[in-house]
Amino acid sequence: MLPLPRPVPMRTVLAIDQGTTGSTAIVFDDEGQVRGRAYSEFRQHYPRPGWVEHDAAEIWEVTRRVAREAAQAAGAEPEAIGITNQRETIVVWDRETGEPLHRAIVWQDRRTAARCRELSEAGHQEMIRRRTGLVIDPYFSGTKLEWLLENDPELRRRAEAGEVAAGTVDAWLVHKLSGGARHVTDPTNASRTLLYDIDALDWSDELLDLLGVPRAMLPEVAPSSGEFAVAAGEALGFEAPVCGIAGDQQAALFGQGCWHAGLAKQTFGTGAFLLLNTGAERVASEHGLLTTVACGPAGEAVYALEGSIFIAGAAVQWLRDELGVIETAPETQALAEALESNEGVYLVPAFVGLGAPHWDPEARGAIVGLTRGSGREHFARAALEAMAYGTCEVLSAMIADSGIQARELAVDGGASLNDWMVRFLAGIVGLPVRRPALVETTALGAAGLAGIAAGVWRDADHFLESRGEPSVFEPDMTRQERERLMDGWHRAVRAVRSYAAG
């Protein structure tokens, strides 16, 4: 009797998804199945109104712990590591000791709003948009780093002497994983700093001079798929190369298979981020969008239009944690379904200003249209509807800028599990909405970039072959209803901006 063939050993990749409110680690096997998972939140710090900070040391400890737990749950040592991260959050640390020198300043932080106005009024907007594809806004890392250097002369002295490293969270994690051996990032993260020339794919001396940032602080920029560093055994309990890095939204775009021009996805997390791949040619926006770097099928740099909505799932967290309207996020679906309409109630969750397409850092949140009969159902429904209205605004701007008429919209992220919200979204945008079987496409994209570089998958198409069947939500709203609802949203946004303007 012939012996039975031996099974092929399972090959695995660890994806680290370092987000705004917590860190997730997922181990995927070479068939795209989840073999291990762990998650932990970390503390948010609000030292002043509009300021948001994280403890970078806590981020590292939480991330290291969940990575170890996920690998233990998988029962396998991953062959490669992929990292995806909150993009615009900036960390500064001592090159020699690896200790943070200030709390990380988070992408939501608005402390540099006045400086951004000053830069705009001085006429730098066009040059910055031409170099970076971005607008001048506190959202991005550059003015945060400038603020740190301006408010700590000793930090500036040490930075100019080459003793201080600065980077987005991916660079911080690579530094810690490699035991301080590597200071490196990828183009998708670099392109969110206000310091990176997205045509030259290099740090811009003109922008470094403008914001007073020493080049010596900044990381090397390497392609998104390839070996960045080797994670030391003492960091995670096993040794493996870090072979993929991408900012969270670009990782999700890759994980959705949107690596060719004309494909779009919306990720619903703390915020909501819509990206449209425009291929090898950058598209300049005239409608309040960003031009940013994304990943092609081999992890090479391509371009995308992006619309950033600062608050999405965070509005549901606000209902739960600050108002006590709900106990768990899934409750919002039943509450929204309990109403036949929104009855004129709109929530504009501009808690940290408005992003695309308005870019109003002074705006603040409001709920309008309340009556004596308004209750928790209205608050819950308004929070879900706001995600769809913001998406519709951004998608309309993308179509106007690119001339591309999307055929469908891919969605992912935690809030996309809410069937009511996704059905409403399909109706508002007037397009089929595709939700993949695994909505954690941010982590999946990071795994794909790493696994392709490490040979776990032959190429991008092989990587996506094992995805399950998606759910598709068809639009069922009339054009007249869509226009009526969007008109109410536009009026609510105008009211918020008018109040902020005084």
Image (cartoon, grey):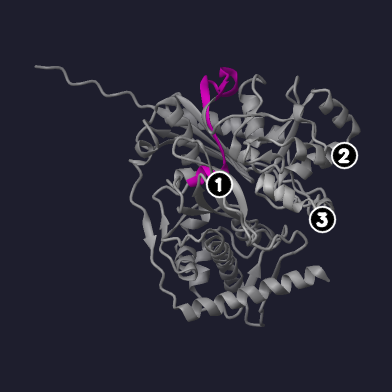
Residue labelled with disc 1: 249
Q: CA distance from mark 3 to mark 2?
A: 17 Å
Residue 248 falls within the magenta-colored stretch: yes
Q: Tag 3, which secondary structure?
A: helix
In this rendering, is residue 139 above or below 177?
A: below
* Total numbered circles: 3
Point 36% across, 44% down: residue = 467
Q: Looking at the rendering, which quadrant does residue 397 occupy?
A: bottom right
| Disc marking residue 117 | 3
| Left or right, residue 497 beside residue 298 | right
**Image vertical order of residue 232 relative to residue 90, above or below:** above
Residue kind at label 1, given as amino acid type? Gln
Residue pictured at 48% horizontal, 37% vertical: 37
Whether residues under marks 2 and 1 lie with C-beta atoms below 8 angstroms apart, the answer is no
Q: Position of residue 485 (x, y in %)?
A: 55, 77
What distance separates the C-alpha of mark 1 from that of mark 3? 27 Å
Which span is picked out in magenta? 228-253
Q: Nearer the viewer, mark 1 or mark 3?
A: 3
Instruction: Answer with mark 1 or mark 3, whichever residue precedes in sequence.
Output: 3
Q: Which disc is residue 150 wearing?
A: 2
Q: Amino acid at mark 3?
A: Arg
